[in-house]
Structures are given as structure tokens and as C-alpha cells.
Image (cartoon, rainbow, N blue to C red):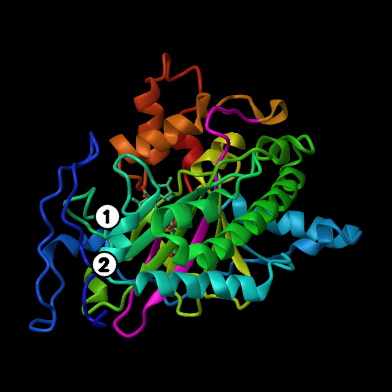
Amino acid sequence: MDAAQPPPTLLPGPPAPGIDAPREAAVCDLRKEPKIPEPFVWPNADARPASADELDVPVVDVRVLRNGDAAGLRRAAAQVAAACATHGFFQVSGHGVDAALALAALDGASDFFRLPLAEKRRARRVPGTVSGYTSAHADRFASKLPWKETLSFGFHDRGVTPVVADYFTSTLGPDFEPMGRVYQKYCEEMKELSLTIMELLELSLGVERGYYREFFADSSSIMRCNYYPPCPEPERTLGTGPHCDPTALTILLQDDVGGLEVLVDGDWRPVRPVPGAMVINIGDTFMALSNGRYKSCLHRAVVNQRQERRSLAFFLCPREDRVVRPPPSAAAPRHYPDFTWADLIRFTQRHYRADTRTLDAFTRWLAPPADATSTATAQEASSC
Ligand SMILES: C=C1C[C@]23C[C@H]1CC[C@H]2[C@]1(C)CCC[C@@](C)(C(=O)O)[C@H]1[C@@H]3C(=O)O
Ligand SMILES: O=C(O)CCC(=O)C(=O)O
Ligand SMILES: [Fe+2]
């Protein structure tokens, strides 16, 4: 791909109901002019420059959960509590994810996105679902197109079928069997790490031990590979726009380029890549599971003129039909209604572009509160 080329936009397929019927995104030949196509231009408020002040995201060594270091465990729980009750981000080291596997997963993303568009289109996203290949979400949105290509697929281990390995071979063919094996193994390790982190969250919140770990034991998660090409006008667009993750927990493996930023006290604060660490952030579903005590916060990904960037986001999600409800010890007054992940994922894929207020919009979409005074409103709980 030419370094200055925008992500190749797909001819819009039938738009999912409830989301803009996209015009074909104007894609000009950037070899002739150093300007990005209009649909990729974001409002200044979203794309405004970041602070030079990096966010001090604590790096927690999760080995303290297993090595009997009681003082270390208390320190880790305190670090996680302070981070999750404010900006919702921390990093983990000592996670045990094989470094060669993590590298293979990052490099596998590069290999996939370097394929000819026609080959990538064989995996194109099924409208109304999150799975598949998309470029700039041009099949879903008509404006504020993100400067990225993505490949997303589901993961669960409720049966014996290696669902991710099967996805690659069934969607892309037997030549992709090695790539499928890498992501199958990677997702298995991400699931295990997620459950370890759930233990740490239980401890830090002081809730019933096992409540969150058991809630996600039979989870249905989403793996997303993000590819951000170099951009001729990085200050006018975004790789991923400002949003809170609707999911429960995100484990982000980013390469060494940098681009993740978190909104803290009105400033976009860069999160510097820490070699070997993984970035963890609370999503809307876990904010509801903690009854608003831990915050799902706004973040974005910026792009740059010189380097491509890759990130792998493992989105932990409950089994579709599990009712999202905080543990009894944290449930009064309720800030969010009961809901299922099936409802929230359908909302984001068919009715609403996940953004800065997804959970509030979802709560209203589900059913306006019968009496706004009888329960704390989502806004009160979700301020970061
Ligand atoms: C459930 C999901 C929807 C998105 C992927 C996962 C969790 C993050 C969401 C997303 C990245 C938030 C920003 C907007 C979005 C459209 C994107 O830029 O990709 C969102 C994802 C999606 O709807 O595909
Ligand atoms: O690529 C990144 O750094 C962040 C991506 C992200 O926030 C997402 O995919 O939800
Ligand atoms: Fe995100």
C-alpha cells in the first residue's frame, strides 16, 4: 500500500438498519494532492491536539495474584482501584503471554492488511455484525471515517471447536490455517489473562470473590486487529474516534509507534507503549457491573505521517444472554438497568455508532427510566 494512500474504502454494501446509508466515500488519488478525502475529516473538537503530558498509567505485575506476595497484592489492588475509579486505564506485566506469540499476532496483522483488497474483501464484515474485515467503516458510516482498516472475529471456548482457527480457514482458505492457529492461541491466552484481571478487580472493589471471574467464565469475546496506515494530514483525521468501549474489559497490545490517548480532565493524554506490557481499560459493561464505581472512559487513537501502526484489542464480553447486574454488595442505588450483552452489541452494530455516550443512549433505547428520581442516572455514574 502506498504510504500516503487512505485505507481502501469498500463500495458500500447494504447499510445496516439504523446507521447512515453511506455515500461512496470520495477517495482521491493522494499521489496528486496531499489532502485527505473529505469523509475522513473529523470535527476539530474530536481531533484537537493532545497534551504533551503523557498519562501515568500504572503497570501492575499480575504475578502478585499467584506468588503469595500479600503486600504486593495490596499495592496492586490499590493501584488498580485508583486508576479504574478515575480514567479507567492500567497496564499489566508478568501476564505470562508468550512474547513470541504476541509478536506473531502483531506481525500476522501486518501480513493480513498487506493482502490485496480483493483478498481482504473475502472476509468483509457481515452487515449488522462486528465480525470481518472493514476499511474505514465506509460500509457503515458516511462521515467521520476512521483512518484504519480492521479485522474482527469472535472468540469463545465453550466447546471443543477452535472457533478462531476455523474462522480463518473457512473465511480465507487453507493457506490461512497458520494465521488462524496464531490467533486461536492468542485469544485463549487473552481469555485466561482476562479472568486473572477479574480476580484483581474483585479484590480492588472488595466484592464477592469469584463474582466477576465466574461471570466471564463462559464469555463470548471479540478480537480486533487494528491497522492504521500513515496519513498525509494526521491532524485532520483520527484512527479511532473518541469513544468508550461498550464491552467489559479491553486488553490492548500496541506496537511501539504510539497513538492511544485518554481524555483526562479535558486533555487528551498519550499512553506511551511499555515494551512487554498490555494496556487494560474498563468498558461500559464493566462500569455497569461495578454499578458505576469503575469508569469506562473516553479514548481515541491518532495517526501520523510517517509510520503505520498496529494494535490488537481483545474485548472481553459476557455470554450473550447473561444479565449484566452488579454484585449484591455493590448494587444500591442502581445506576444502570439490567441488560444483556446481546442487546448492547446489537445496539452498537445496528442502531448506534459507539461513541462518547453509548451507555447513556443504550439505557434510554432500552427503556427511559420510569422515574428519574428513583434511581441515580447513568450520567452521574459515568463521569470520568
Ligand atoms: C462492541 C464493539 C464496537 C466497536 C468494537 C467493539 C468495542 C469498541 C467499539 C468501537 C471501536 C468504538 C469506536 C467506534 C467503532 C465503530 C470503531 O471505530 O471501530 C467501534 C467498534 C464497532 O462498532 O465496530
Ligand atoms: O488502537 C488503539 O490504540 C485503540 C483502539 C481502540 O480504542 C479500540 O479499538 O476500541
Ligand atoms: Fe477502544
Which residue is at 13% across, 76% downward? 35
Disc 1 marks a residue whose amino acid type is His
Q: Position of residue 54 (x, y in %)?
A: 50, 73
For label 1, the crowd category at 10 Å Cα-Cα, with few meaning under 14, some 14 to 19 and many 20 or more, is many
Tell whether 121 sits left or right of 199.
left
Q: Quadrant of ligand 3?
A: bottom left
Which residue is at 36% across, 42% downward? 129
| CB at disc 2 and ligand 1 closer than 8 Å | no
Which residue is at 35% across, 26% downward? 365
Task: Pick the quarter of the image with the N terminus.
Answer: bottom left
Q: Which residue is mark 1?
A: 137
Q: Which residue is mark 2?
A: 117
Q: Position of residue 44 (x, y in %)?
A: 22, 63
Magenta segment: 300-326
The quadrant in which residue 74 appears is bottom right
The quadrant in which residue 83 appears is bottom right
Disc 2 marks a residue whose amino acid type is Leu
Mark-to-mark CA distance, 1 and 2: 14 Å
| CB at disc 1 and ligand 1 closer than 8 Å | yes
**Which residue of the protein is positioned furthest toward the front in this rendering?**
174
Q: Taking 18 as reference, is 240 above or below it?
A: below
Q: Nearer the viewer, mark 1 or mark 2?
A: 2
Task: Determine whether the residue tagged by mark 2 lies in a helix, strand or loop.
Answer: helix
Which residue is at 61% across, 40% downward? 219
The stretch drawn in magenta includes residue 173: no
Q: Nearer the viewer, residue 242 or 275?
A: 275
Q: Position of residue 266 (x, y in %)?
A: 40, 59
The quadrant in which residue 209 appears is top right
